[in-house]
Image (tube, rainbow, N blue to C red):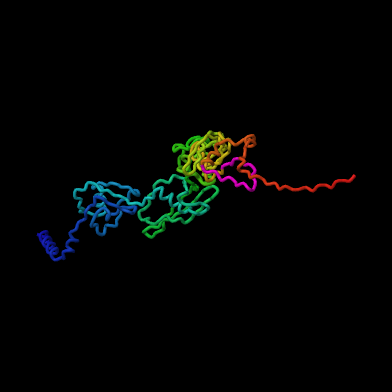
């Protein structure tokens, strides 16, 4: 009788309450299947909905940063009953997964923070050219998720002679407590990208793609401008070099297309005229170099430009041809006109005239005017008387 009366009173009270109040009154605690936490403890309010005043009660230690733990429904209900929380709705949940959120710092992030702290300081250059080696292996680091600030260097020390660094960082957080402190030590050196030989190379060899690799080397190992891989391929070395040697711009030269004492083809070229003859190089030369060559036919030394392997081109406009020996002329005789291009080319390949040939040269009489000699009457001496 009493139970029936209490039930009736409860029904009347529910009908008398507003709709929102009735929903809050009848809402029962419900278990969550997946839980995420940021603190180091798991509270009742994390595990169930509608926990009420019991929401802030801690019941479990949180998993490690960035990891997930699993609890059976029986384990959770047993702990909740111990905290006087009953009547929890579980539905078809079999287990509860609890994940602790974290902020992850990759080793690359830490390395970038160190190089940024050293950039353009202590005699170092760009951060991209600084290579860092830590004293202890710096793998992935996990911090509490509340640490949302940047890695700010608060103390930086560096020894330029040894390359040793000691840098302290601070990371601000959202909880307004003391910032998280981190400290890293190690070695930092400035490096440069440089072409490096993959095998021993002789001076006469042309560098192929397989002969050169691109590496980062300490800047102190490369004195002068470092050579790039693209610039090195197809070039020659100034001297023989061993594998593993970094190349400088001063170490490479354009390949020699003409070698001293090498048989070459001499090309004489002017507009409308193209002649070739045999010759011998007097000096080495790369493509585009100006070298001296000996014309084997005329025995003359010419100057030309290396235009290919074993080829030297003599341009008509830049090469003055040797003239044939001239006979002394009087003022009444006009000088011969300059020979045309064909005659100029011929003079480059003809042998010079000998002294005997010059002596035998005859000048036509028609070219020499008759000299007029005035006649002078000489006075006669007076006769002596006897």
Secondary structure that dominates the magenta span: loop
The residue closer to the viewer here, 349 or 13, is 349
Name the residue nearer the viewer: 147 or 196. 196
Q: State whether residue 64 appears in this view.
A: yes
Q: In the drawing, does residue 334 fall left or right of residue 45?
A: right
Give how far across and how far down residue 271 sits, in percent: 47, 44
Q: Is residue 43 above or below residue 13?
A: above
Position of the C terminus, as image quadrant, is top right
Magenta span includes 337: yes
Q: Which residue sits furthest right?
A: 386
Q: Is residue 294 left or right of 66 when viewed as pictured?
A: right
Q: Which residues are magenta?
A: 321-341
Residue appearing at x 33%, y 54% in the figure: 39
Q: Quadrant of the N terminus?
A: bottom left
Camera-side residue: 354 or 234?
354
Q: Residue at x 43, y 51 (%)?
A: 112
Q: Nearer the viewer, residue 273 or 314?
A: 273
Q: How many marks?
A: 0
Estimate the x, y position of residue 373 in percent, counting from the top left. 70, 46
Examine the rendered structure and indicate whether residue 262 appears above or below residue 126: above
Residue 140: percent from the left, percent from the top? 39, 47
Residue farthest toward the front in the current orientation of the protein? 386
């Amino acid at each position: 009788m009493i139970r029936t009366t209490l039930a009736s009173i409860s029904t009347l009270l529910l009908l008398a309450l507003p709709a929102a109040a009735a929903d809050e009154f009848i809402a029962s605690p419900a278990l969550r299947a997946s839980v995420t936490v940021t603190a180091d403890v798991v509270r009742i309010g994390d595990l169930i909905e509608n926990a009420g005043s019991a929401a802030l009660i801690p019941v479990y230690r949180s998993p490690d940063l960035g990891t997930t733990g699993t609890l059976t429904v029986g384990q959770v209900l047993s702990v909740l009953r111990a905290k006087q929380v009953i009547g929890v709705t579980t539905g078809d949940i079999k287990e509860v997964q609890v994940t602790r959120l974290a902020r992850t710092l990759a080793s690359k992030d830490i390395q970038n923070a160190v190089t940024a702290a050293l950039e353009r300081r202590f005699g170092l250059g760009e951060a991209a050219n600084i290579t860092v080696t830590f004293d202890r292996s710096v793998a992935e680091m996990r911090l509490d998720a509340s640490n949302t600030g940047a890695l700010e260097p608060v103390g930086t020390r560096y020894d330029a002679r040894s390359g040793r660094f000691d840098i302290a960082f601070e990371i601000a957080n959202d909880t307004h407590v003391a910032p998280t402190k981190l400290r890293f030590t190690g070695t930092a050196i400035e490096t440069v990208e440089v072409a490096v030989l993959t095998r021993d190379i002789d001076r006469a060899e042309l560098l192929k793609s397989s002969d050169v690799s691109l590496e980062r080397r300490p800047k102190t190992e490369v004195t002068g401008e470092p050579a790039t891989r693209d610039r090195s391929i197809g070039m020659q070395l100034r001297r023989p070099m061993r594998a593993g040697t970094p190349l400088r711009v001063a170490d490479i030269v354009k390949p020699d297309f003409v070698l001293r004492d090498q048989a070459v083809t001499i090309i004489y070229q002017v507009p409308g005229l193209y002649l070739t003859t045999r010759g011998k190089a007097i000096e080495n030369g790369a493509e585009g170099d100006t070298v001296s060559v000996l014309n084997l036919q005329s025995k003359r030394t010419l100057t030309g430009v290396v235009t290919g392997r074993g080829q030297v081109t003599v341009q008509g406009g830049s090469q003055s041809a040797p003239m044939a020996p001239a006979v002394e002329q009087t003022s009444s005789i006009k000088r011969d006109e300059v020979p045309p291009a064909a005659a100029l080319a011929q003079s480059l390949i003809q042998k010079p005239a000998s002294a005997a040939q010059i002596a035998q040269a005859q000048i036509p009489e028609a070219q020499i005017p008759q000299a007029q000699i005035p006649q002078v009457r000489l006075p006669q001496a007076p006769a002596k008387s006897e």
